[in-house]
Image (spheres, helix red, strand yellow):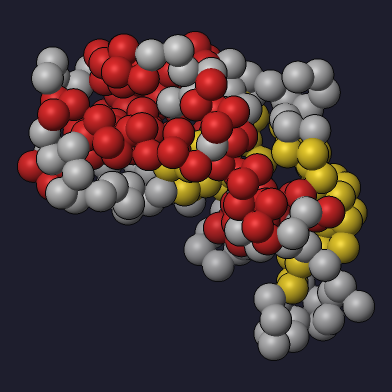
């Protein structure tokens, strides 16, 4: 694709029945292969912004393009389909299926995204390669997820987000439970895989120590003018 992976212009979002709690973003662009840290304190709107970018909720106003498509023009059903095809998500709590095999967890996005599935010539080979690249033990694909260590589950969640080379990967506080050394090792693995996939990465964190590891740091208070009463009216 050409152009930015993410383009936001004059976006306004307000949670229903919560006057005064709004998110207003005049402009935000993220290019292909960029690794962006979205930084801000708890309650500042970071997770709401990820939900908008992932198409989980839709803005009341403005343009929000992911991989060239304006999500604000799609119905909820088609936003879900578009997200499955084009966005990989690493959840803070990983959200693995505990009794399913690692291979089934990693391949799960492909079940809902035929175009993404078509980008994977051999699913078994892709899963083995991702596991090896993320320093997971040989043969782990056949283990149920609940038997893995927290660090292993974390890397399986990364493999699931990256299979099928989505244009954009969103990561919501994936290092919050790690110490500084473990954070650095995990991010090295994550960055290597994102670069190999040719994806852009937006990672949310409240930990400013991570800033030096990213191509760009966006402080949410710098792109959001602030909440106001009925900001989308």
Name the residue rendered at 67%, 52% in the picture.
Answer: 79
Q: Position of residue 122 (x, y in %)?
A: 38, 14
Name the residue rendered at 68%, 60% in the picture.
Answer: 76
Front residue of 78/97: it is 78
Rendered-image quadrant of the C terminus: bottom right
Looking at the image, can residue 1 be seen?
yes
- Placement of 77 over or under 194, stated as above or below: below
Looking at the image, can residue 36 be seen?
no
Q: Position of residue 58 (x, y in %)?
A: 73, 61
Name the residue rendered at 23%, 39% in the picture.
Answer: 153
User: To which quarter of the image does residue 224 belong?
Assistant: bottom right
> Position of 221 compared to 177: left or right?
right
- Placement of 149 over or under 22, stated as above or below: above
Q: Position of residue 98 (x, y in %)?
A: 19, 50
User: To which quarter of the image does residue 75 belong?
Assistant: bottom right
Q: Position of residue 105 (x, y in %)?
A: 29, 39
> Position of 146 compared to 232: left or right?
left
- Placement of 173 over or under 152, stated as above or below: below
Front residue of 104/182: it is 104
Front residue of 70/50: it is 70
């Amino acid at each position: 694709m050409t152009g930015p992976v993410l383009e936001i212009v004059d976006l306004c979002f307000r949670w229903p029945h919560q006057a005064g709690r709004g998110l207003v973003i005049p402009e935000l662009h993220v290019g292909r292969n960029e690794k962006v840290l979205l930084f801000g304190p708890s309650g500042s709107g970071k997770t709401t912004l990820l939900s908008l970018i992932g198409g989980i909720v839709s803005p009341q106003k403005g343009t929000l393009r992911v991989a060239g498509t304006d999500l604000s023009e799609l119905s909820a059903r088609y936003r879900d389909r578009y997200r499955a095809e084009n966005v990989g998500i690493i959840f803070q709590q990983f959200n693995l299926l505990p009794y399913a095999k690692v291979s089934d967890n990693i391949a799960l996005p492909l079940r809902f995204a035929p175009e993404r599935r078509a980008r994977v010539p051999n699913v078994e080979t892709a899963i083995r390669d991702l596991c090896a690249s993320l320093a997971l033990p040989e043969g782990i694909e056949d283990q149920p997820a609940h038997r893995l260590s927290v660090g292993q589950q974390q890397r399986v969640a990364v493999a699931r987000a990256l299979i099928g080379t989505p244009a954009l990967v969103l990561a919501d506080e994936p290092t919050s439970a790690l110490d500084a050394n473990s954070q650095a090792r995990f991010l090295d693995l994550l960055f290597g895989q994102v670069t190999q996939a040719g994806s852009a990465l937006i990672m949310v964190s409240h930990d400013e120590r991570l800033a030096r590891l990213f191509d760009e740091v966006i402080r949410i208070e710098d792109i959001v003018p602030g909440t106001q009463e009925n900001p989308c009216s």
